[in-house]
Amino acid sequence: MIPNHSATPDSQHHQSHQVIHNYDHQPDKPEEACGVFGIYAPEEDVAKLTYFGLYALQHRGQESAGIAIFDEQQVHLHKDMGLVSQVFSEEILQQLPGNIAVGHTRYSTTGSSHKANAQPVVVDTRLGEVALAHNGNLVNTVKLRDELLKNKCNLLTTTDSEMIAFAIAEAVNEGADWVNGTIQALHRCEGAFSLAIATPEGVMGVRDPHGIRPLVIGTLDGNPTRYVLASETCGLDIIGAEYLRDVKPGELVWITEEGLSSYQWNQEPQKKLCIFEMIYFARPDSIMHDESLYSYRLRLGQQLAAESWVDADIVFGVPDSGVPAAIGFSQASGIHYAEGLIKNRYVGRTFIQPTQHMRESGIRMKLNPLKDVLEGKRIIIVDDSIVRGTTSKKLVKALRDAGAVEVHMRISSPPVTHPCFYGIDTDNQKQLIAATKSVEEIAEQIGVDSLAYLSWSGMLKATGEDTNNFCSACFTGDYPVAIPEQIKRSKLVLETVTV
């Protein structure tokens, strides 16, 4: 889903609007690419159901949102920059009739904030139009783009998502049906991709052979003729859909009036779900491996306490993602849990630029310390990750200014030492603080009395699953899908890294 920066935007891009990013244009967190949603539900208001599904998946992307709905052969498409609630209104949803839909909510990388790159992508074929929503990132975009351009494909955006849609159109235009055409296109794709694809006949859900990005299937009101696809189970819960199962790695599901059919398009699947989905990206109320992610994050905190206990008066988490691990830390250590930070839940991606002074003290826009709780206390603050260290440094200063006499930071994941090529915006290796500094050096830079990360083995142990079922390349550099040297060199810029 992340744009192919080697592409040359056409004139259409220059006419589109550019969004203004949040004041912290380099967030100290890994950034997820997007959330996808698909639905086949005759006689239902699929526009509103898709809207609410995207609303539940808003945490996966706040840059743009879109819905494409099929009313027989006609496609109704609306997408724009902004949050789901900003892009859609009651009036707009009423203008989107039909019973087949896909929706998308997107986070984009720096330099790609264009309306033209918003999804779903819609492409015409001999069988009608196809609408595609994509979560992930292809690693063979240069090769695929060259192939499509040689075949005279009129690429209009810089996204790899559009390339997948055009690859499907090529196969269909050469005589394939929807399923076989899509499978032919998928064999041209390398990397991470979870797809919701709408056609005039039905909806497809697809995962790459490693299942790096999640995708689940649900039934609406338990009706086997009405199916829902979503990046997470919270996208099902909000509309009252019942979770059926995950789309399997290397599987394509085809949902039509005849029901759900399954095709194992890749015969050598090897499950490698992104471990950061469990640590941070997915909502804590989403279900993975038959339990809520809240439960997993509790265990991360318990394991963290076992590995890196320190004497303190209170422990608390960075809201919201650090809170479950902080509660687990408290349970295992016996140290009192308290709320030390209050989050302003209405600060998101703003179109209003703050002043330079506000940027410098920007942490207060999102998080405000509770002075009467912190004053004179030895505190442990738990967070899920540190990427660059910039936000952590501001946060530690704010805690000390509020009266904390000792600040100990505990991270419920290992040090992030390698960039992601599968749909997480981690930039290049130089910008990852743990790739260039030791734990002691990071502690000194961000200003804490002590710093400890969860071990890699402890993180995987807490899943309760086969530890080989997860991609943890951002911690180890062991990439499950081979990365072309040209792309790898653009991000792996260090000669030596100690992991």
Image (spheres, rainbow, N blue to C red):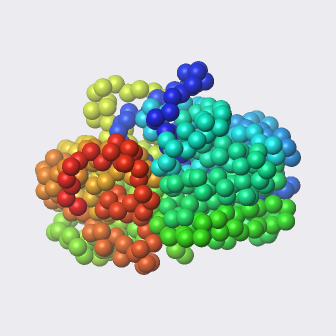
Q: Nearer the viewer, residue 120 or 329?
A: 120
Residue displayed at 67% across by 71% down: 244
What is the x, y in percent for residue 273?
Answer: 48, 65
What is the x, y in percent for residue 367?
Answer: 35, 45
Q: How many marks?
A: 0
What is the x, y in percent for residue 76?
Answer: 77, 39
Outermost residue toward the front in this view? 150
Q: Is residue 301 positioned above or below 81 on the image? A: below
Left or right for 485, reference 268? left
What is the x, y in percent for residue 222?
Answer: 76, 70
Residue displayed at 79% across by 69% down: 224
Q: Quadrant of the C terminus?
A: bottom left
Q: Is residue 46 positioned above or below 115 on the image? A: below
Q: Is residue 176 visible?
A: yes
Q: Nearer the viewer, residue 197 or 182?
A: 182
Left or right for 380, reference 190? left
Left or right for 130, reference 497? right
Q: Is residue 131 visible?
A: no
Residue displayed at 21% across by 70% down: 308
Q: Quadrant of residue 180?
A: bottom right
Q: Nearer the viewer, residue 381 or 78?
A: 78
Residue displayed at 43% across by 68% down: 470
Q: Is residue 265 positioned above or below 82 on the image? A: below
